[in-house]
Amino acid sequence: MIPLAIINGGLRENVLIKLGNIALPLSGIILSICIFVVAYLLIPKIKNCKKTDYIIFGIIWFILINLFDLFMYISEGGGIKELLNSYNFLNGNLWILVVITTLASPIVVLKIKEKKGKIKNV
């Protein structure tokens, strides 16, 4: 997912930025969709997992994406304050949507696949 986030950031800074104020929220939506698609494609590949395993996947992904983001802020001279500020959707930043999607995608995809009968014995 980190490569997706980096590509998304490049897309935002080089293409979407021309759209003005909509660039940042659109970037958040695009990244959220990409994260969900990755989860949708990967979950069926994981065999013999229980429901709790998918919850753990979401938690681990959530922690890792926030640690990566914090590392990026620190490498640019910022810190935890900037990370927490990115959760403020009032300034157009939909980072909160991204982290919620990251946390919830594994279990949501599991539920979708269960309903379709593609994953059993969970």
Image (cartoon, helix red, strand yellow):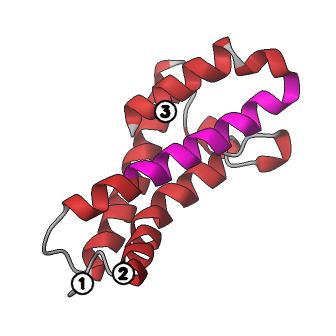
Q: Residue 91 carries which label?
A: none
Quarter of the figure with the N terminus: top left
Q: What element carries label 1?
A: loop
Asked if marks 1 and 3 touch (Cβ < 8 Å), the reply is: no
The residue at the point 76 percent across, 28 percent down is: 23
Task: Name above or below for residue 46 compared with residue 97.
Answer: below
Closer to the chain start, of discs 2 and 1, is 2
Task: Name above or below for residue 109 compared with residue 83.
Answer: below
Check the image and name the residue furthest to the left.
Answer: 48
Asked if marks 2 and 1 touch (Cβ < 8 Å), the reply is: yes
Amino acid at dot 1: Lys
Q: Is mark 2 on a helix, strand or loop?
A: helix
Q: Name the residue under label 3.
A: 5
- The prevailing secondary structure element of the residues shown in magenta is helix
Q: Is residue 99 left or right of residue 94?
A: left
Asked if marks 3 and 2 touch (Cβ < 8 Å), the reply is: no
Magenta range is 20-38
Task: Name above or below for residue 20 compared with residue 46.
Answer: above
Q: Distance between the residues labelled 1 and 3?
A: 31 Å
Q: Is mark 3 on a helix, strand or loop?
A: helix
3 vs 2, front mark: 2
| Callout 2 crowding tier (Cα within 10 Å): few <14, some 14–19, many ≥20 | some
Q: Mark 2 points at which residue?
A: 114
The residue at the point 86 percent across, 22 percent down is: 20
Amino acid at dot 2: Glu
Closer to the chain start, of discs 1 and 3, is 3
Nearest the camera: 63 or 7? 7
Q: Residue 120 carries which label?
A: 1
Tell me which corner region of the image, top left, top right, bottom left or bottom right, holds residue 80: top right
Residue 44, image x and y in percent? 26, 63
Amino acid at dot 3: Ala
Q: Does the magenta stretch include residue 15?
A: no
